[in-house]
Image (cartoon, rainbow, N blue to C red):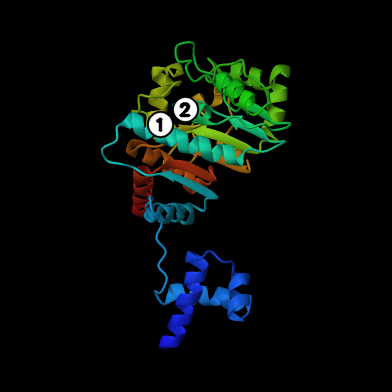
Amino acid sequence: MKEDKKKLLAKVAYMYYEQELTQAQIAKELAIYRTTVSRMLNQAKAAGIVEIKINHFDPSLFELEEQMKQAFGLTAVELVPTENDSSEEIKEERLAAAAGAWLRRQLSDDMVVGLSWGASVGKAVSKIEPKQLANVSVVPVVGGPSHINSRYHVNTLVYELARKLNGNSLFVNATVIQETKALAEGIFNSKYFHELKEYWKRLDLVIVGIGGPLSYHKSQWRDLLSAADYQELKLREAVGDCCCRFYDSYGKELNGGVNQRTIGLSLTELADVPQSVGIARGISKARSIVPLLKKGYLKTVITDQETAQEILRLNQRK
């Protein structure tokens, strides 16, 4: 490239990036077309005359987000940087803050929002700043926990989010796992449950957590499972749960005794929601997240850097 050409490219770049003139102003001052200014700015970057550096953030995180989107055909990925010296509690707090901020940007008038429950979803909801919206409805997509594990009860989260959005809330009055298949079917087919099922057909966005392997001990609801349930799930090689629906490493929903007694949105129904958002982190949960992404049950995932790296590693092994 000739020196006079380089000088002109440098001048245009200086006027645009340092003097903060618009492309139209530069075009007028240099007596060239505005489209020429745009082309010259691109040439300046290509020639190394302009180098753009993003401070206070690692661009590799954006690259990792893009890799996740490409690998699983996701609509959106929100990643939190992982600092090796951070405690698990701090990592959870950062994930919740990022999830809360991302979710708030998605929420708008006239939406029907569904919630599952658990620590990740509960913490994310607590971080969502109030937003005055019109005609928003917030509903549960799963039954509730036992009286023992009620800290993140789905009705509590539904009420809290609806209050923050100036919206309406609908509650569920049944535990997520019933004693028998007949009881579960009775609830699903009851007049009381009809309104909730109608809302499930109109969901615009669903926020769900992801349960880890059977050995994962932080679950808020698995105390409702019997020893026989655990044995069945182990034999059928369950690797995780979402909306309290267990699935295997291929993402197949395990339609056994446990599933038939579960009150909640099915994974197939979850996949049909325009925005299905999963919030989860942790190396131990990566194996549980991969099948949900590969099967297309989730369109958005909010996690952290180390979990995303492990997800991609596991996906490449298959």
Horizontal relation, residue 257 to residue 27: left or right: left
Q: Quadrant of the N terminus?
A: bottom left
| Label 2: how many Cα within 10 Å (few below 14, some 14–19, many 20+) | many
Q: Which residue is mark 1?
A: 93
Seen in the picture, residue 86 relative to 305 is either above or below; the reply is above
Nearest to the observer: residue 136 or residue 242: 136
Q: Residue at x 63, y 40 (%)?
A: 273
Q: Which residue is mark 2?
A: 123
Is there a contact, CB below 8 Å, between mark 1 and mark 2?
A: yes
- Rendering coords of residue 239 (x, y %): 40, 36
Q: Secondary structure at mark 1?
A: helix
Quarter occupied by residue 39: bottom right
Q: Amino acid at mark 2?
A: Lys
Residue, far top: 147
Q: Amino acid at mark 1?
A: Glu
Quarter occupied by residue 113: top right
Quarter occupied by residue 171: top right
| Label 1: how many Cα within 10 Å (few below 14, some 14–19, many 20+) | some
Q: Residue at x 39, y 51 (%)?
A: 61
- Rendering coords of residue 133 (x, y %): 69, 33
Q: Residue at x 72, y 24 (%)?
A: 195
Nearest to the observer: residue 184 or residue 164: 164
Q: Residue at x 51, y 35 (%)?
A: 100
Nearest to the observer: residue 73 or residue 131: 131
Instruction: Give the number of callouts.
Output: 2
- Rendering coords of residue 5 (x, y %): 46, 85
Residue, far left: 85
- Per the model, the C-alpha gap separating discs 1 and 2 is 8 Å
Residue 246 appearing in the image: no
Marking on residue 29? none
